Image (cartoon, rainbow, N blue to C red):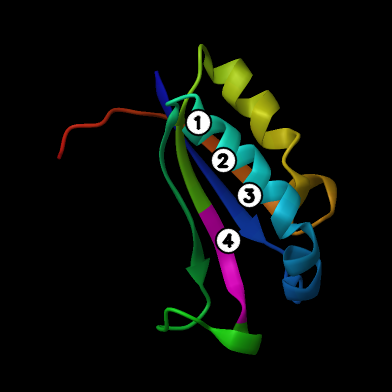
Amino acid sequence: MWYAIEGYDEEGSLPTRLAARPEHLARLVALRDQGRLLLAGPCPAIDAEEPGPAGFTGSIVIAEFVSLQEAEAWAQDDPYVVHGVYKRVQVRPFRKVLP
């Protein structure tokens, strides 16, 4: 089943986010290579593709897991959680309808 994983950034966490990004992306690439990643990306803090020092408010990942518990465990092991970028993570089942 698909799961939506939403991470919400701590205020002022941009430097930590940038430092943890290679580890974070490696896990997403692994999901992609397994055919389990629908989409992933950050949410800019301002209305701009590249927000610069304004940074991000969080990220969204939609990926396939065997269970909600597996998705939650994967989310908790994310480098953005481990290094304190995210103040909170929400994992919910997701049903893809379109496209």
**Looking at the picture, does residue 46 appear above or below residue 7?**
below
Q: Say which residue label 2 marks.
A: 29
Disc number at residue 25?
3
**Looking at the picture, does residue 59 appear above or below residue 17?**
above
Graded by Cα atoms within 10 Å as few (under 14), some (14 to 19) or many (20 or more), the crowding at tag 1 reads few
Graded by Cα atoms within 10 Å as few (under 14), some (14 to 19) or many (20 or more), the crowding at tag 4 reads many
For marks 4 and 1, the one nearer the N-term is 1
Check the picture and name the quadrant holding the C terminus: top left
Q: Say which residue label 4 marks.
A: 58
Disc number at residue 33?
1
Q: Distance between the residues labelled 3 and 1?
A: 12 Å
Do tag 1 and tag 2 residues touch (Cβ < 8 Å)? yes
Query: At 73% across and 68% down in the image, what residue appears?
Result: 18
Q: Nearer the viewer, residue 69 or 42?
A: 42
User: Residue 80's spot in the image, x, y percent?
Assistant: 73, 51
**Looking at the picture, does residue 9 appear above or below residue 78?**
below
Q: Nearer the viewer, residue 42 or 25?
A: 25
Task: Say which of marks 4 and 2 sits in front.
Answer: 2
- Segment colored magenta: 55-59
User: Residue 43's spot in the image, x, y percent?
Assistant: 49, 66
Tell me the amino acid under the disc marked 3: Leu
